[in-house]
Image (spheres, rainbow, N blue to C red):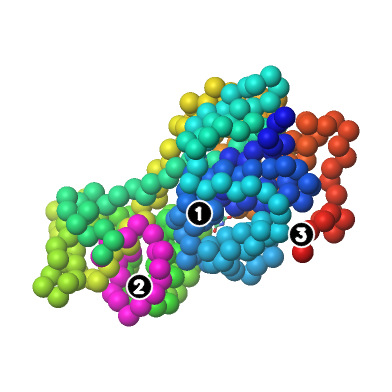
Amino acid sequence: MTDYDITIVGGGPSGIFATFFAGLRNAKVQLIESLPELGGQVMALYPEKTILDVPGFTGIKGRNLVEHLDQQLAEMDVDVKLGETVQNVARIDTDFKIVTNKGITTSKTVIVATGVGAFTPRKLAVDNATDFEGTHLFYSVKDLEHFRDRVVLVAGGGDAAIDEALLLETVASKVYLLHRREQFRALENTVDRLYASNIELITPYLIRALQLTPADQVQVTAKKMRTEAEMTDLVVDDIVVNYGFSAENSVLDEWTVKPTGQRGQVEAQLAGVTDVAGMFAIGDVSTFADKQALIATGFGEAPLAVNAALKYIDPNNRGGMHSTSLKLKH
Ligand SMILES: Cc1cc2nc3c(=O)[nH]c(=O)nc-3n(C[C@H](O)[C@H](O)[C@H](O)COP(=O)(O)OP(=O)(O)OC[C@H]3O[C@@H](n4cnc5c(N)ncnc54)[C@H](O)[C@@H]3O)c2cc1C
């Protein structure tokens, strides 16, 4: 007997909501996530950021959104497996064999929700950077309170860097934003909020060296771009670098059965249908014309893919019921 109707690979927002919805539709479902906690990019990269474009919330902190998703998921009888990576997916007749670092299960369908895969932040290219990591140098704001009443330098010029600088401004005694260009590459609204803030801009500069002072602060040497000029009088308590992140979705390439796609992404239709029968893809990992890699997009794709998976299992399955006509645990 097949263990599961649906296996969802990846516990980011798309995978969590798909698992909830599959539970709502009474499917036997497992969610497999390689990290020790659910939440994908939101928890790993920007738990403290206020997200403005999630339907139903005027603004919600990343970690609070994931808490809500977790609570919603807890209403369902589903198997959630954390710290487990799907290393291979193969066929056994019409079923799938799901191979992880912890065991083997079988599933009638698979929904790939691996997002951008395993992600690592782009590091500060300074010789002794690792000496400061975790004490004075950070690649995301995991604990806002750490920065209370401190002088913080944020490095980077995209949406995430500016969002972080604006967030830090709410607790820090002083925030600098250092960017190697004069212009910021971010949403107009984000840049407007930056210019309206008290954040001190240092452009166009690039961090070249860090040195610990006797007062346990960091003296930053920064080079003015396209000149030989150097700034050496900047002393801060903490540095938050946000140069983006590099993503590694190559684990998908190792699967025996895998849908067509390029650079770790999967070509899919809106309902997640791929060119492998019974395998669907949602969220950031899936690509189609005009796709936007947003949380709301993944939320929209999740029920469509779950319904398509159940229809694949049983073509007579009607699907598409409202949650009020389905049974919750409580
Ligand atoms: C700094 C930043 C700010 C952002 N701000 C916003 C915003 O304001 N609004 C918005 O809508 N979007 C925002 N986004 C984008 C949003 O985070 C993504 O669109 C969303 O996280 C995609 O969700 P997902 O579930 O598809 O993938 P992910 O969040 O990437 O989750 C995928 C999960 O799959 C797991 N996984 C991967 N491979 C395997 C495997 N083989 N086995 C098991 N597990 C696996 C990963 O560990 C990960 O947890 C932002 C992104 C970043 C980086």
Q: Which of labels 3 and 2 is toward the front?
A: 3
Q: Which residue is drawn at the image coordinates 48% and 62% (left, top)?
A: 47
For residue 329, the mark is 3
Distance from disc 1 to disc 2, alpha carbons, whole Å, reads: 22 Å
Q: Ligand 1 within 8 A of label 2's CB?
A: no
- Depth order, front residue of 6/242: 6
Residue 21 circle label: none
Q: Which residue in the protein does label 1 denote?
A: 37
Crowd band around label 2 with a 10 angstrom C-alpha radius: few (<14), some (14–19), many (20+): few
- On-image quarter of the N terminus: top right
Furthest residue to the left?
A: 214
Specify the segment rendered in magenta: 136-155
139 falls in the magenta region: yes
Count of numbered circles in the view: 3
* Discs 1, 3 touching: Cβ within 8 Å: no
Image point (40%, 68%), residue name = 143
Q: Is residue 93 visible?
A: yes
Q: Are marks 1 and 2 in contact (CB under 8 Å)?
A: no
Mark 3, Cα crowd under 10 Å, few <14 / some 14-19 / many 20+, is few
**In the image, what residue occupies the spot 26% across and 65% down?**
135
Q: Residue furthest front?
A: 1
Between 282 and 269, the one lying in front of the other is 282
Q: Is 155 positioned to the left or the right of 209 in the image? A: right
Question: Given the image, on which type of amino acid does mark 1 rest?
Answer: Glu
Viewer-closest of 218 and 17: 17
Tell whether position 281 is magenta. Answer: no
Give x and y (percent) for residue 31. 61, 44
Asked whether mark 1 lies closer than 8 Å to ligand 1, one says no
Residue at x-position 24% and y-position 49%: 125
**Element marked by disc 1:** loop
Q: CA distance from mark 1 to mark 3?
A: 23 Å
Q: Secondary structure at mark 3?
A: loop
